[in-house]
Image (spheres, helix red, strand yellow):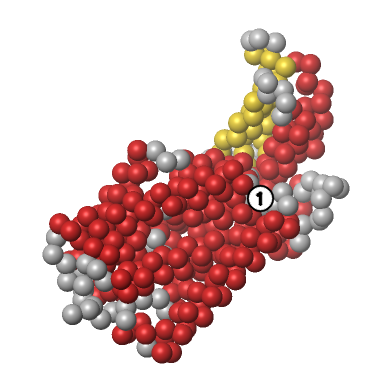
Amino acid sequence: MTARLVEIFLPESAIGTLEGILAKHSRRFWRESVPGGMEKYTCLVQQRYTERLLDDLTAEFGNEPRFLAQVSELEAVIPPVLETPDTALPADPHLPPPTAIERFFSRDRISTSELYEDIEDSLRITPSFLFTVILSSIIAALGMRSGQVAVIIGAMVIAPLLGPSMGVALAATVGDARRGGKAALAMATGALLAVLSGMLVGSLFSIDLAEPELRNRALVQPADIALALACGAAGVLAMSRAASLSLVGVMIAVALVPPLAATGIFLGAGEWGMAGGAVFLFASNLVCLNVAGIVMFLIEGLPPKNWRITLGLLAAWTAILVVVALIAAGWLVLGIGNIAFITPAP
């Protein structure tokens, strides 16, 4: 469904300004009085115009303590709210006109506010988040120990670190330092817990370091970088359309927890070279997710607060990606991966 139901609560004195805003963004709206001298407006908005409506409401009423706006997804509307050239609203004169690519990709994207809400829970360091990281790491470590691919996939589906990674990309795109800090802290905390959980498994159980599912986490090839870039772009597309089921495929394809769990196992065994390879795999996946995420968010028309900051962060992530790719290519050419990171020390 390509429409949203927006409910707005405001004091009666503000209804003149509000109706002027709604006339610009909504084709249908209704008014009703609620207790406390408040008015409630309910309107149907095409999905692609939800963000513009919320931006105008925030700019006009953001300092009004009794202002409230809530957005709901609709399953069906009769007659339907169609997105056609005839229903297109005039472009915002204060913004540059969207490119053809932006119009194409943003026509079914949820609003930035909805993206924030969807990702906010995964940025909080709560007991649930901590236990999820620990359990997924233990599952991944035990799966790699026994070579059970299905168990490793189960740990990938849990994917507690995918949300913070996407949060870093979203914060970098829009220039939100506060949210970026929360995402980075959640990522660092989760990564440390995952490594410690892997070390715990390695200390409690005997592990064959030559197990293919384990040693594969200590090697990065250029194809792995291409895979992570594609998965980062696909993840943003799925998230920006609230397609949670599509994210499962991304979680399985590019994993963050298994390399960290493998790092812990290798550290516990004193295999510093293999631990370095596993950390490098995690870092390469994280860098690729962020580069692809920022690029895709920009293509979809997310509005940066400061283009200089956003492009600077993208350039920094891209420079790191180039270094990672060169190292991976060098390992492949020189055969270092086959020697130092796969063969355990005697």
Position of residue 331 measured from the top left corner of the image (x, y, whole percent): 42, 84
Q: Amino acid under label 1? A: Gly
Indicate whether 251 appears above or below 330: above
Q: Is residue 251 left or right of residue 287?
A: left
Please give the residue where the numbered disc 1 appears in the rendered image.
175
Label 1 Cα neighbours within 10 Å, binned few <14 / some 14-19 / many ≥20: many
In the current view of this chain or complex, which residue is farthest to the right? Answer: 93
Picture coordinates of residue 143 (x, y %)?
Answer: 22, 62
Q: Residue lying farthest bottom?
A: 334
180 left or right of 160 in image? right
The image quadrant of residue 322 is bottom right
The residue shown at (28%, 74%) is: 215
**Image label count:** 1
Can you say whether 236 is above or below 3 in the image? below
Pinpoint residue 216: horizontal percent, then vertical percent.
31, 74
Task: Please tell me whether residue 174 is drawn above or below residue 71 in the rendered image.
Answer: below
Q: Which percent across, then down, holds residue 109?
A: 61, 51
